Amino acid sequence: MRAQATFGGGCFWCTEAVFQHLRGVEKVESGYSGGDGPADYRSVCSGRTGHAEVVQITFDPDRIGYEDLLRIHFSTHDPTTLNRQGADTGPQYRSIIFTHDATQQASAEQVLQAMQAYFSAPIVTRIEPLVQFHKAEDYHQNYYRDNPAAGYCQAVIAPKLARFRRQFADRLDQGA
């Protein structure tokens, strides 16, 4: 049995790179969700579509639980900043969890409440039902894996992955 989770935590390149390294995660696709109308990089970056940059994670719940993915999501971005992650600003970079069913909704609410104890500021992460996922353009898929020497990858993603690897070493896929 396979399941899906859809999270936004700033730039989808960063989020994708984190979740690709987890044991039990089979596929991570970058995309857009939460807005109206067409979703392509140019229109979403304008901040006027209402879409957020997100990743859709296909995982094996027998190997990694949805609640584990939620805790990792909260731990690998700043869920206390509204419409911002680092230098990336605008509603397209908001912290959000798109749930696929009522069970995910309840789990997301419980984990959010539990994670609040680890942050001095209020968590502003939104939890909403997934309406539609728009897969991002091909050049956004596997961005860090395909472009590790790019400036953004070296300055932003590589340090984030190093912290992630230290914090979640017991959950990493072999060779991650």
Image (spheres, rainbow, N blue to C red):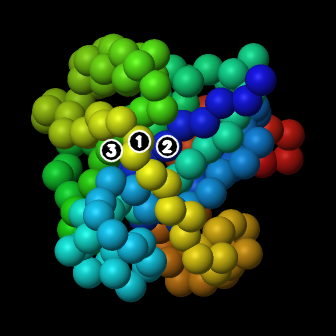
| Mark 1 to mark 2 CA distance (whole Å) | 8 Å
Query: Of label 1 and label 3, which has the lower sequence position?
Result: 3
Query: Of label 3 and label 2, which has the lower sequence position?
Result: 2
- Residue drawn at x 45%, y 52% is 132
Q: What residue type is labelled 1?
A: Leu
Residue at which label 1 appears: 130
| Mark 3 to mark 2 CA distance (whole Å) | 9 Å
Residue at which label 2 appears: 6
Labelled pair 1, 2 in contact (Cβ < 8 Å)? yes
Hey, which quadrant is residue 102 in on the image?
A: top left
- Depth check, mark 1 against mark 3: the one in front is 1
Q: Which residue lies furthest to the left in this view?
A: 121
State whether residue 127 appears in this view: yes
- Above or below residue 39? Residue 109 is above
- Identify which residue, 154 or 53, lies in the foreground: 53
- Identify which residue, 59 or 111, lies in the foreground: 59
Hey, which quadrant is residue 166 in on the image?
A: top right
Q: What residue type is labelled 2?
A: Thr
Residue at which label 3 appears: 96
Q: In this view, does 15 lie to the left or right of 49?
A: right
Give the quarter of the figure containing the N terminus: top right
- Percent across and percent down for residue 105 are 37, 23
